[in-house]
Image (cartoon, helix red, strand yellow):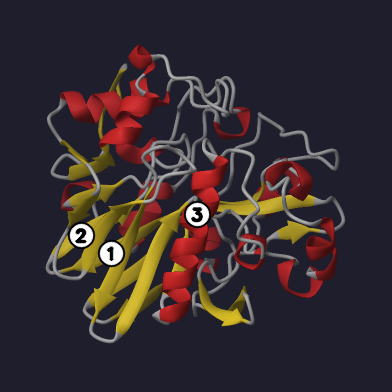
Amino acid sequence: MDQIVLGNVTVTRIREFYGPVGITPEAFVPESPKEVWEAGESWLSPHFLDYETNIVHSAVQTWLLRSEGKTILIDTGVGNHKERPYAQVWSRLDTDFLANLARAGVRPEDVDIVVNTHLHVDHVGWNTRLDGRNWVPTFPNATYLMAKADFDFWNPANGHPSVFGRGNQNVFEDSVAPVHEAGQTLLWEDSHHIDADLRLDAAPGHTPGSSVLTLTSGTDRAVFVGDMLHSPVQILEPDANSCFCEDPAASRATRRKVLGWAADHNALLVPAHLGGHAAAEVGREGGKFAIKGWAPFTPFTPDASDASDASDASGTPDTSRTPDTSSAAADQG
């Protein structure tokens, strides 16, 4: 199953990549207790961690929402043909993402709204496509919603240092500026109502302009949280940040606030990068959060090329590989 219905909103999972990303749990979520990973093999394997190589598995995916007659994309992944000299695992990809979107019945010109939860390399790539030698908006009729705080932070003209180092190099120039120059961006602050069922809210920490999208429709609730967490371990350990969080204290506060809301409102928690069933139901156990259940999406399974080529046992990315997201592979997710 690639699709669920929440109230009046249809949610479809569009795959770009799934597999190992060349990083260990200790490096990815350095504040997480080692014993939590060790004790979690029965549910973390195989979708979230390869216990033989000790390499984290991650999904890059877009959430397609159909709401009030609008076609909405939440995050646009890595994109094709992008030069990423300091994020080599994402450099010069050539995936079947647009074909996967077409299989869901959506052409680029059909998209009305693109939401970038933040402006990292793996969330904005398909904002643009290469047309000859120029980057042009992939979705020519869409309004791209970007938090102004992130737009300003990642604009290289402003010279802000980042814990990401040079990992986001070229991203603003090839995936953000072209849509802004085309007049297709809406830079919002604090909160933004998309329609009666969908609302964007600032959720700073991972980046200054990180945001969450809350779905409230009928009796159903969901919250799309971007990179508020990268692993389900962070539901159990909400104070454990990823290595990419710009403001550690704000990240912890945001994570606890959103997890609390999800638990108290029986809301589906939908992060950007979880493989497996992709989204979780969150509850409370004593003073901690717990995973009550998983969304009914069919779990991704690694493609042969993903599993064998994306990293070696030492966790070093192989920068030459091209993830295979052919139709057969896409059908698995």
**Sequence order check, earlier mark of 1 and 2:** 1
The CA distance from mark 1 to mark 2 is 6 Å
As measured in the structure, the alpha-carbon distance from the residue carrying label 3 to the one carrying label 2 is 32 Å
Residue 165 as seen in the image, left or right of residue 145: right
Q: Residue at the bottom extreme? A: 219
Q: Residues within 10 Å of mark 1 (few under 14, many from 20)?
A: many
Q: Residue at x 41, y 14 (%)?
A: 159
Q: Position of residue 326 (x, y in %)?
A: 51, 53
179 relative to 292 in the view: left or right: left
Residue 273 horizontal/vertical position (percent): 53, 54
Tell me which residue sits at (34%, 21%) in the image: 155
Q: Amino acid at mark 2?
A: Thr
- Residue 253's disc is 3
Residue under numbered circle 1 = 65
**Mark earlier in primary sequence (3, 2):** 2
Q: Are marks 1 and 2 in contact (CB under 8 Å)?
A: yes
Residue 285 location (% of width, % of height): 63, 82
For marks 3 and 1 on the same chain, the one whose residue lies earlier in the sequence: 1
Using the numbered discs, state the Cα–Cα distance from disc 3 to disc 1 in whole angstroms: 28 Å
Kind of element beneath mark 2: strand
User: Left or right: where does residue 77 sit relative to residue 31?
Assistant: left
Where is 103 relative to 252, above or below? Answer: below
Numbered circle sitting on residue 6: none
Q: Secondary structure at mark 3?
A: helix
Q: Nearer the viewer, mark 3 or mark 2?
A: 3
In depth, the one of 196 and 51 nearer the eye is 196
